[in-house]
Image: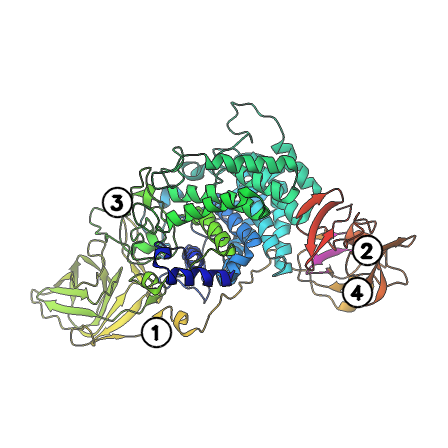
């Protein structure tokens, strides 16, 4: 594929008429999209945080209910963690990693994808605080949307909300199960122990969702205004069952899906499973089920439904410029819904053989919608923030705005965001391809987790198909390119009578600021600013009305009044802190966090050469992006939400006597007559044994796998280390051999993903070869 990319690029360079006019650098846009997800992180950020203007936030999430709900992702331009759309988003990201892994690897973004999915999975497992208890939201949308605060400076209430058996929420629980099941597949060959943890939670959460049915907005009324589930919860239960079927091969999940999907519903029942011709979305998962069911069962009925759905999408209207457009949905986030519509066609095309004529037709549709978003549109806008000079600069986002854009009459917002929200997909154009890059235009300039999910999915497919063409430097390099180049320090501080003017030049912007100085002069009152610390070591910071330093020399003024009428203020040890402060709104208190700011010593009034950084200067922010000290993401290892079993000596571990290893820190995934079992690539015993050698392997060694090749009166036999070994039926759930194929090996586990089904049963791939599932799987 890389060779194909080179040929495509060389051909474009050799023939001017073939040069790509708009970006088709799908690989670079995957990188940008993953940067957006990093910018949305909540909690304590890792050392390899690549978004220099983001810092730790909401470290007390869940404290109101005595639980740790730190981590996860903020939903959009606000500071609320809505789990319903977040789970839907992360399911698509994990799905894209499972089936488009090659695309991510060719783009050099595989590790970053895993990091993004893991960050979400860690949080969702924290939210699962009991068998039938799941936290589904942190923060109140009604409260939060009344403030324009970056997440680091939130000082208003952010309550946590949960669902329980008596107050259920099948749609959000079903979606959470889908995500964790998909994550378990994604991590199966990367971190098997973590994969099993995800699967364990997915099973329990799905059982909760299915057993105690109900709509979560009845338990969490705050969500009704923001993410009410208009399509009902059966689509999430069906989708969740399919993901667990793919993750486990357990036919019971397949049956649960069929019971929902194949039932008959009245035409007037708007929340029945029914038929869907719209795109997959945070609300409606039926299109995902159409495609996933076809992929993992191969049944003719499911294949025909998938074909029907994809063909139906292609018949629907587009804008004059070619963007797929649904009158009922696309007014708010048209780019999102066009990407969502294309994503399921792309996923089905990826499943189809190359000989199928519809495959290329579906991929062409994915490409056309993606190319529109990347600039092949009448507005001549690349709708990915930070991608090109013509990309949106004023998306509706509190953290990146760097300004006091609120209901306050005195606030003076910037026209464009101070910080670049790299990779965010802006809402998109109207029905006539019109677009306005204005923060107040929510419909066109909103950003959100789910906006990027299917879009990123499509990018990975196109890279996998060898269609990505690298952008030239002239496109990639602009004022808002990633990473941000270090600024030229240029701050001026000037005394003028009873006023102190502060300004920045050379393009250096400060979203907020504090002036530090030493003086024996007694300042009683300041106007247009706040005294954070009184003299002689003063710290005076901006109010909302004095606002930001714009980098163009516009002064912000502190007007002061002393204890006497003279204005003989003299300042020494003058320092300006850029950022690290948030002026209060309404009745809230200001927030001073110098660890989030950059301090500069001002010499002789300042200016270029007289503004001295009080921190280590680097060529870009953060510095490791330039010096390569942290080139790849560091895997985040979550704490196990359950207390591990007390360590035991291996000599006392029951599993040793049965031919297995011990693993006291693994999650319990099976309990039988011998004790508790975990799985970290092989079965392993947890805890000491109160049992004897019940169900031992007699005089033969026990197999550490489940791949039987012979059966006699003693049981099922396999081969290990060139010796016969007896397969323990309680671990493998087989009577042996009992896969039908005589040409291919039996699968070693029932937990492998199902890739095909025929007259011999279900099939998966193991050790780069087809394997046939045991009949008892």
Observer-nearest of 647 and 89: 89
Lower position in the chain sequence, tag 3 or tag 2: 3
What residue is pinned by disc 3? 407
What residue is pinned by disc 4? 656
Classed neighbour count for the residue bearing mark 2: other residues with Cα under 10 Å, few (<14), some (14–19), many (≥20): many
Residue name at image x 60 percent, y 47 percent: 353
What residue is pinned by disc 1? 618
Picture disc at residue 708:
2
Q: Which secondary structure lies at badge 4?
A: helix
- Residue 728 in the image, given as x and y percentages of width and height: 82, 55
Observer-nearest of 576 and 155: 576
* Mark 1 vs mark 2, CA separation in Å: 60 Å
* Mark 2 vs mark 4, CA separation in Å: 21 Å
Observer-nearest of 7 and 254: 7
Q: Which residues are magenta?
A: 671-682
- Please report contact status of discs 2 and 4: CB closer than 8 Å, yes or no: no
Is residue 31 something that shows in the picture? yes
Between label 3 and label 1, give the one nearer the viewer. Answer: 1
Lower position in the chain sequence, tag 3 or tag 1: 3
């Amino acid at each position: 594929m890389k060779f194909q990319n080179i040929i495509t690029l060389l051909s474009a360079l050799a023939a001017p008429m073939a040069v790509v006019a708009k970006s088709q650098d799908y690989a670079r846009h995957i990188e940008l999209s993953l940067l957006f997800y990093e910018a949305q992180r909540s909690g304590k950020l890792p050392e390899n945080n690549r978004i220099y203007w983001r810092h730790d936030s909401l470290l007390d999430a869940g404290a109101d209910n005595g639980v740790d709900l730190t981590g996860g992702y903020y939903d959009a331009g606000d500071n609320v963690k809505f789990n319903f759309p977040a789970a839907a988003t992360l399911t698509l990201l994990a799905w894209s990693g499972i089936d488009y892994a090659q695309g991510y690897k060719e783009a050099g973004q595989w590790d970053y994808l895993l990091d993004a999915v893991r960050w979400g999975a860690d949080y969702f497992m924290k939210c699962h605080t009991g068998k039938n208890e799941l936290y589904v939201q942190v923060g109140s949308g009604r409260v939060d949307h009344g403030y324009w605060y970056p997440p680091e400076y939130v000082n208003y209430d952010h309550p946590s909300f949960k669902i329980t058996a008596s107050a259920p929420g099948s749609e959000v629980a079903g979606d959470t199960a889908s995500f964790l099941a998909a994550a378990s597949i994604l991590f199966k060959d990367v971190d098997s122990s973590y994969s099993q943890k995800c699967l364990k939670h997915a099973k329990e959460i799905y059982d909760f969702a299915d057993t105690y049915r109900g709509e979560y907005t009845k338990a969490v009324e705050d969500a009704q205004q923001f993410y009410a589930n208009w399509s009902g919860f059966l689509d999430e239960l069906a989708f969740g069952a399919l993901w667990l079927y793919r993750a486990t091969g357990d036919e019971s999940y397949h049956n649960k899906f069929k019971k929902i999907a194949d039932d008959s519903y009245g035409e007037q029942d708007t929340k029945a499973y029914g038929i869907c011709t719209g795109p997959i979305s945070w609300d409606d998962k039926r299109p995902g089920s159409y495609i996933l069911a076809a992929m993992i069962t191969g049944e003719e009925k499911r294949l025909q439904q998938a074909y029907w759905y994809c063909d139906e999408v292609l018949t629907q209207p587009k804008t004059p410029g070619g963007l797929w457009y649904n009158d009922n949905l696309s007014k708010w986030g048209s780019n999102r819904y066009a990407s969502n519509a294309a994503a399921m066609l792309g996923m089905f095309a990826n499943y189809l053989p190359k000989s199928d004529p519809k495959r290329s037709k579906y991929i062409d549709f994915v490409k056309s919608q993606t190319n529109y978003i990347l600039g092949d549109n009448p507005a001549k806008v690349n709708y990915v923030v930070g991608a090109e000079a013509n990309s949106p600069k004023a998306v509706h986002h509190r953290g990146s705005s760097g300004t006091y854009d609120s209901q306050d009459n005195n606030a003076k917002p910037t026209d464009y965001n101070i910080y670049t929200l790299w990779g965010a997909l802006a809402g998109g154009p109207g029905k006539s391809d019109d677009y306005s890059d204005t923060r107040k235009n929510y419909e066109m300039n909103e950003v959100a987790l789910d906006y990027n999910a299917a879009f990123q999915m499509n990018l990975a497919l196109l890279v996998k198909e060898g269609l990505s063409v690298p952008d030239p430097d002239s496109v990639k390099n602009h004022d808002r390119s990633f990473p941000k180049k270090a600024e030229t320090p240029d701050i001026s501080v000037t005394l003028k009578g009873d006023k102190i003017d502060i300004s920045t030049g050379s393009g250096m912007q400060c979203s907020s600021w504090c002036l530090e100085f030493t003086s024996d002069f007694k300042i009683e009152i300041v106007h247009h600013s706040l005294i954070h610390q009184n003299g002689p070591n003063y710290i005076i910071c901006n109010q909302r009305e004095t606002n930001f330093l714009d980098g163009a020399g516009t002064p912000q003024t502190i007007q002061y009044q002393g204890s006497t009428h003279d204005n003989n203020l003299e300042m020494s040890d003058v320092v300006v802190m850029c950022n690290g402060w948030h002026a209060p709104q309404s009745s809230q208190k200001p927030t001073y966090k110098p660890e989030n700011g950059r301090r500069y010593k001002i010499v002789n009034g300042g200016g270029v050469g007289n503004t001295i950084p009080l921190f280590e200067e680097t060529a870009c922010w953060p510095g490791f992006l330039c010096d390569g000290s942290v080139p790849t993401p560091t895997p985040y290892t979550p704490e196990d939400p359950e207390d591990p079993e007390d360590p035991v000596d291996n000599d006392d571990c029951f599993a040793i006597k049965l031919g297995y290893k011990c693993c006291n820190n693994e999650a319990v995934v099976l309990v039988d007559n011998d004790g508790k079992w975990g799985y970290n690539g092989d079965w392993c015993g947890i805890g000491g044994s109160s049992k004897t050698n019940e169900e031992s392997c007699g005089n033969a060694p026990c197999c550490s796998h489940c791949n039987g090749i012979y059966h006699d009166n003693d049981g099922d036999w396999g081969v290990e280390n060139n010796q016969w070994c007896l397969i323990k039926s309680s671990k493998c759930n087989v009577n042996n051999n009992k896969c039908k194929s005589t040409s291919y090996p039996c699968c070693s586990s029932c937990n492998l993903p199902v890739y095909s089904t025929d007259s011999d049963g279900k099939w998966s791939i193991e050790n780069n070869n087809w394997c046939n599932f045991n009949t008892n799987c």
